[in-house]
Image (cartoon, rainbow, N blue to C red):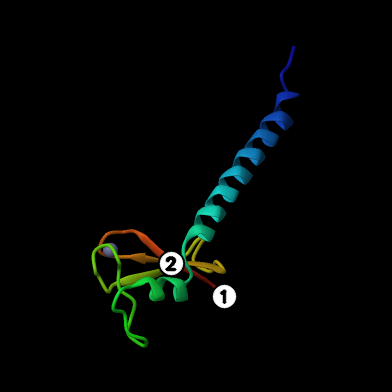
Amino acid sequence: MNHFYLIPFLLLCGLFYGMTFAVLKLNRWKALPTEEQYLASLAGHLAGQPAQCSHCASATIEERGEWGRNSQERVFVCQGCGRKLYRSQH
Ligand SMILES: [Zn+2]
């Protein structure tokens, strides 16, 4: 008896888990505030000033692609505490 019939089943399981994690990741990205919302939520932030981390006040914020370097979904991460602060899309 061989078990080759398991191969498509396992591939489908892998696809299902991959899609589930992708959807969860996309939902987490969508839950982040946009840059405008984030800057508006900063107390005492003046228009035109660079963004600051609301957790550790670090001004060193790195832009990353959520899915890779050239990803359309951009996320801005504080270099002081490592938290994701806000998102943008382009
Ligand atoms: Zn921080």
Q: Nearer the viewer, mark 2 or mark 1?
A: 2
Q: Compared with residue 50, is residue 18 higher up or lower down, i.e. above or below?
A: above
Give the residue pinned by disc 1: 90
User: Residue 42, image x and y in percent?
Assistant: 33, 73
Amino acid on which the number 1 mark rests in the picture: His
Q: Residue at x 71, y 29 (%)?
A: 9
Side (left or right) of 24 relative to 15 = left
Q: Compared with residue 5, is residue 63 higher up or lower down, i.e. above or below?
A: below
Quarter of the picture holding the C terminus: bottom right
Tell me, yes or no, whether the two marked residues, 2 and 1, touch with CB atoms within 8 Å: no
Packing grade of label 2 (10 A; few <14, some 14-19, many >=20) is: many
Side (left or right) of 63 relative to 59 = right
In what element is the residue under mark 1? loop
**Which residue lies most toward the bottom here?**
48
Q: Residue at x 30, y 68 (%)?
A: 53
Find the distance from the CA under tag 2 to the CA under tag 1: 14 Å
User: Residue 33, image x and y in percent?
Assistant: 46, 66
**Residue 11: quarter of image:** top right
Side (left or right) of 83 relative to 9 = left
Packing grade of label 1 (10 A; few <14, some 14-19, many >=20) is: few
Q: Residue at x 60, y 50 (%)?
A: 23
Label 2 CB sits under 8 Å from any ligand 1 atom: no
Give the residue pinned by disc 2: 86
Amino acid on which the number 2 mark rests in the picture: Tyr
In what element is the residue under mark 2? strand
